[in-house]
Amino acid sequence: MSIWDGRTLTDHLPLHRQESIFARAGLALPRSRLGEWAGVCGVRLQPLVDALRDELLEHNVLHADETPVQMLDPGKKKTHRAYLWAYCPTSYEAIRGVVYDFAPSRAGEHARAFLADWKGKRVCDDYAGYKASFSTGVAEISCMAYARRKLYELLANNQSQPAERADVHRFTLRRRARNGDI
């Protein structure tokens, strides 16, 4: 089963490809059995996921991001874009967990459903799907990666003195945050 877990989760191999790989190795593992294992693992791990979600929602600051994944549309033999939404506390918290929530679309309703009545500060990009929750008691903390990218572009393309000062200020803030000064 550990070989199957690694191929499914780490190597992102769909079940039909795994079935072929196992067959070449002389092991008859039909797709239906692999799918059954996936379902059993999901059911058995769900209480752990729920407990981690509950723990994360106790924190005042959460990071959130979504990333596209290809999902096979059964019967159509084609893929369509679905999303994995990731939620985690800051790197300054003792807990180092990340909860991934699968959703068939990028609609902001998926983030709102996952977070439910949570109130706090959310570190996220400027995606419009997050905006609706900002009127319900969730505060936005903009993602520094996007600001850093824009500063870098200004520095690289224009040799902008304000961008250079902002970049120095960003490193000062980061050092102060690490030291617990802010």
Image (cartoon, rainbow, N blue to C red):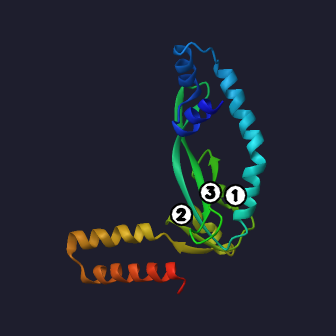
Pointer 2 residue: 128
Residue 114's disc number: 1
Secondary structure under tag 2 reads: helix
The mark closer to the camera, 1 or 3, is 3
* Residue closer to the observer: 108 or 23: 23
In the rendered picture of this protein, how many numbered marks are placed on residues? 3
Q: Which badge, 1 or 3, comes first in the chain's sequence? A: 3
What's the amino acid at mark 2? Ala
* Residue closer to the observer: 85 or 40: 40
In this view of the protein, can residue 143 be seen by the observer?
yes
Secondary structure under tag 3 reads: loop
In the rendering, at what x and y percent does residue 22 appear?
56, 19
For image coordinates 59% across by 48% down, the residue present is 105
In the rendering, at what x and y percent does residue 66 appear?
55, 55
Distance CA(mark 1)–CA(mark 2): 17 Å
Figure check: 76 above or below 108: above
Q: Is residue 48 left or right of residue 164?
A: right
What's the amino acid at mark 3? Val
Q: Is residue 79 left or right of residue 102?
A: left
Figure check: 41 above or below 165: above
Task: Judge the density around disc 3: few (<14), some (14-19), many (≥20) Cα neighbours within 10 Å.
Answer: some
* Contact (Cβ within 8 Å) of mark 1 with mark 3: no
Secondary structure under tag 1 reads: helix
Task: Judge the density around disc 1: few (<14), some (14-19), many (≥20) Cα neighbours within 10 Å.
Answer: some
